[in-house]
Every structure is written in structure tokens, then in C-alpha cells.
Amino acid sequence: MQKIKINDLIDYQFISLLSANPSKTNHAYVLSKPNIGENNYQSTLYVGTHKALDLETSKSYFWETDTSLLIPFAKNEDEKQAQKEMKTILYRYDLNLKSFEYLTTLYVPVYNLIVVNEETWIIQTSLSEKEHVLYEDPANRDDYLKQVKDQDLYEIIETIPFYSDGGTFTRSQKGQILSYNPKTKVYTNLFDKDISARVLSYNKHTKKLYILAKEFTQVLDFYSDAYTYHVETQELKKVYENDNALAIGDFFELNETTYLFASDNKKYGINQNSDFYLLKEGVATRHTDFGRSSYNSTGSDVRLGGNVSTHIIADKYYFVGTYQDRTVLYQFDGTLTEIYAPKGSIDGILFLEDTVLGVGLFDNKLQELYHFNLEDDSYTQITNHNTDALKDKYVAKPIYHNIVDGEDQMDGWVLLPENYDQEKKYPAILDIHGGPKTIYNENFFHEMQVWANAGYIVFFCNPRGGDGYGDDFADIRGLYGSIDYQDIMDFTDFVLKNYAIDENRMGVTGGSYGGFMTNWIVSHTDRFKAAATQRSISNWISFYGTSDIGYYFGPDQTDADPLDDFEKAWEHSPLKHARNIKTPLLFIHSDQDYRCPIEQAMQLYTVVKKQGVDTRFVWFKNENHNLSRGGKPKSRIKRLEEITQWMDLYLNEK
């Protein structure tokens, strides 16, 4: 068998944007692949199971009719320049004629587009109050853009958050919903300019848009009002006025009954799972006690872009959640039912006229498209985009363990090198997931397979704080570095007892929350001989005012506002305990990571370096928090090379 190597990443392909045509008789999706020469991802549009169109670096499309698609695209330099000027160039792809022709230019950036009929398109965009001139007064849009360019030397900050992960300043932009007539080229804003709004869905049977919106404030929160907009009568109706009562994830109508899928965040804070609420005459009443995860929180580094996982079919609401070690498809029609729970990950699901399709990570393989059999949790693979990438390669099979301690239990897995021999002693790497409200399961992980193929035993688990086991299990507010740390150490002890690991050659790594926990581990134990901390948190106090989510995430998770309880926030900060660090520590961080800003790494690196501990800081330029999963191909390869070489340096026998 051949080894899986770091550069094999460039042979992987990723499936996103699986969607159906209006009559649900056909489907399309985008297939993306790393291009190491251009250091980007090249995408291809598939319709059905056939390659339809090379999209180059574009990754979006919208159904116009059953036989035509609208695609944002730029064929020449003039069109590429127009994109930089906040225009959207739309081409039409005709499935019957196989033609790809320029259609129109929209004068705003387009994040979503819903074609209602020949005279009504719904455009989701994001604009500041001044940027409405882009479509309201096209003759003067160039003057406005010139003024903006003249201000490149500074930013005026008036809101929190002031930037978002990826290096973009918010610039007081608000979600805006425009109704657009492609025949008259007239734009109509559905809300006042000081309202931030986003479309959740469009139901062609009720002819309604389902919208969350709220008056734009200078400190953003979770609490939006719920609206419907009837596209034929043009009636905009507020159906729920939210007095900071519910964080709404979705809302919809079934059989003329309206439901909110929301959380009151009262018992478990911002990570509390959602429940269904019955909405009647503006009053929301809890309808279920679901208490489980309502999204796919399984980890992997072989995805790129997303897929839809909620649908309304025949007055039934379907959604994908996470429970224990897998994703689960639920059906809600007033009563909640679990209807499909294959082992692995449902990365997207689609209901067609006569079948159910989905993007899956199953059987420890890369993404493929599947037919889902909802009767018996089975699935049938219908594409082979990634078959050759793993052909004749050693793919380590995750070995599952369930650790029970009284009423508590924890899932964990071990990957073994090829031809594992219990009589030998192997180096090992502990990998810790982010979140913390995510999970590991048996999804294919490129980095872990690389290490198993390089001769390491790789182990990973789902400590308390993670998703998939209910609200009680996920709630570690004010407990970071305590019960979660103990769970991870307990699993480490279990693996040492049952596998042929050299306890003097163990390494640890993780990103985001996993980076925090790596920092915490090396500042509280010397049992690991090498560590790599990625996109980490080291100081909850500075995190509060520098992260795009810090002002609410930090106080919620540490149960300490730095201004009110400085000592508690500081106690949970690895930086406080940094003088204890003796483990060689590699830092991986990106300068456009505003989720866990790079100053978090800078602070801890400085202390570790000053103490004379072996350390190294790899500072990635123009990358963000998503480096390991969606960064540019060369950056992703360099990251994994650095971590692997660091582990080899300290863990391999000399």
C-alpha cells in the first residue's frame, strides 16, 4: 500500500452547493479542486451527474428555470474590474442549448438570488447606508467608489464587531434584501436602510419569503424580529417582535401554522440548543424539548464550501443535526422524529421528485454524492470524484472507544500505523477539536491520516464542552481547563494503557478551542514532548476586545466579564500559567484571523521564547481562522508540513 502524504491534498475534490431545480426533477452542484500552480481552487459546475461548465474560481450559481442557471462570472478584464467595483456580472447557462452567454449586470454584490418569476428576483446583499447609491444612482456610483478609494488609509469604526474573520472591516454594512425587476431594471428595498435583514427561505407554495430583521445597532446581538413577505401582494408583515427573548435560527409555516426554531439562551448560554416554538398571534410558546444539536458539527479538513441541510417538503420540515458520533436527519410536522442516522456525516441533503440525494463523508472516504435510503439508514454512492485519490493508499480505520465514568461517557478514536505491532513502541499525536461545541467522529481527516501513515498512533476524543450529547454535556461555561482537560487526560491514559505508545514520545496539537486546550495542557503538564498550537486563545482578557466574537463569546464561555471579574477571566487564560511551559511549542496563526486574533499567539510566543523554551512561530499572511480547512492550497500544505516536521523533530527516535 502507498502512503498518504501531505501533498495528496491537491488531488482531493470537494462538493458544495448541491441544489434542485424549481420542479425538483434535476440537481446541480459545484466540484472544486486545489490548483497548486495558481494557488487557488478551480471549480466545475455539474448538472445531474455530468460536467456542465468550468467556473474557474467562481463558486456560486442560482436556478432561473428548470433548464437554466444564473452564474456570477467574469470572462474578461473589464468584467473582473466591474466585480471589484461592487457589481455582479451574471451569465445564463442554458442546459438544453449548452450555451453560456452574458445576461446582465447587477449594481450590488449578490450573496443570494432567488428567481420568483420573470419580473421578480430577490437579491440578498450587504450595504452601508451610503452604499445604496450603487443601485439608486448608477450615474454617480463611480464618484462614490472614488471617495471610498480615497479613504483607503483609514477606517472609521462605529460598531461592534468592527471586523469579521477574513480581514474585512464591517464598515457599518447591513444585510439588505432587494426586490429586482430584470425587465425594468428597477430595485426596491424591502426594508428601511437602517434595518439589517436576511432571507432564511422562500416557499413557492405560500409565495412567501421568511426573513429575520432588526434595527441596526452599534453593538450587534442575536435577537431579530421575524417577518414574512408575500412576493405577489408585496405585503411585508412582522409576525414576531423579539424583545431579546429568542435567538431564532429558522422559522417556517406548516399547514398554516407558524413555528420558530430558536433558543432562549437562558439555561446554557449562547451555545444552548434550539427548540421548536409555536407562534400564534405574535406569541411564541415552546412546543418541544429537543435539546439536541440542530446542525452538522462534525469536523473534517476535506470540505470546501457548504450545502443546504434544511428543507420543507409536503408540509414537513427536515433538518440535519448532530447526535453522539454522527449526523442525524430529523423530520418535524408538529411532532419531531429522527428518520435517518447513517454513521458518518451528512454534509448536505436534497429532496428530488423521486429520490433523496446527499453529499456525504462515509466509510472513512472523501466526499461523494449518494442516494440516501431513509428506510434503513443505508446509502448508495453515485459519484466517484475522489476514488482515485485514495486508490491503493493506506487509510487508517478509526478504532472506536466509549469511556464510561459513572453517569458520564466520552467517545474517542485511535488511528494505527500500517502493520501495527503491539510489541513495538510508537510515537503518538493527540489531536483536539475546535469549538468547543463540535465533535470528532469517523470522518476522513487528511492531517490525521498523514500522521498515521508517517508511523504515529493518532488519538482524538470528544471531551465535555463538545456537541452531540445534549446541552448538559456541552455546558462548560466557567469550567474551561478543568473538566474538559480531565476528560482529555483520562482518554490519554486509556490509550497509553491499551496501545503500544512510547509515553516519552507523545505530541499534542489542536486549533481554535483545540489551540486553547493545547496551550492549557503544556502549561499544566509536561507529559507531552512536543506541541503545536494553532489559531489559539491564550488570553481571555485581550480576546474580549480584539476578536469579532470576543465581546459576547468570552464572557459567556468563561462566565467572567473582564471588567467585572478580571481574576476569573485571567485564571482561565493559559498566558497566566505560561511560566510553567517547558514543552517545545510551535505556533501556527494567520494575520487575518479575527476570530482568534494573531495577538493571542504573539503574547504566548513572547513569554515562551523569553523563557528559553524551544519554540517557532509560523505567521501566515493573508489567511484567516479557516486556514486548515479553506486556506490557499500552498498555505494548507505549508501548515501541515510545519506541524509534521515539528513532531518528527521531537518525537521520532534519534
Image: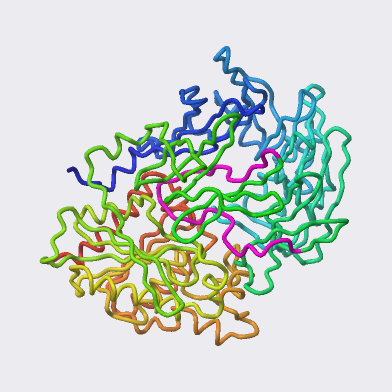
Left of 135 or right of it: where is 626? left
Whether residue 158 appears in this view of the structure is no
The chosen color scheme is rainbow
Residue extending furthest toward the top: 97
Residue occupying the point 60% across, 31% down: 20
Magenta span includes 303: yes
Q: Is residue 451 above or below residue 77?
A: below
Total numbered labels: 0
Residue 121, relative to residue 155: is it above or below? above
Dividing the picture into quadrants, the one containing residue 234 is top right
- Residue 21 inside the magenta-drawn segment: no
Give above or below for 154 relative to 55.
below
Q: Is residue 441 left or right of residue 78?
A: left
39 lies left or right of 455: right
Q: Position of residue 11 (x, y in %)?
A: 33, 37
Q: Quadrant of the N terminus?
A: top left
| Towards the viewer: 344 or 489 | 344
| Residue 219 position by quadrant | bottom right
Residue 514 visible at all: yes
268, 554: nearer the viewer: 268
Q: Give the main secondary structure, helix, strand or loop, of the magenta stretch.
A: loop
The location of residue 205, given as percent across then percent down, is: 76, 34
Span shown in magenta:
286-314
Residue sticking out furthest to the bottom: 567
Q: Position of residue 626 (x, y in %)?
A: 47, 53
Front in this rendered view, residue 513 or 580? 513
Along the line of sight, which residue is nearer the eye, 230 or 118? 230
Picture quadrant where residue 33 is located: top left
Residue 133 percent across, percent down from the top left: 79, 39
Q: Quadrant of the C terminus?
A: bottom left
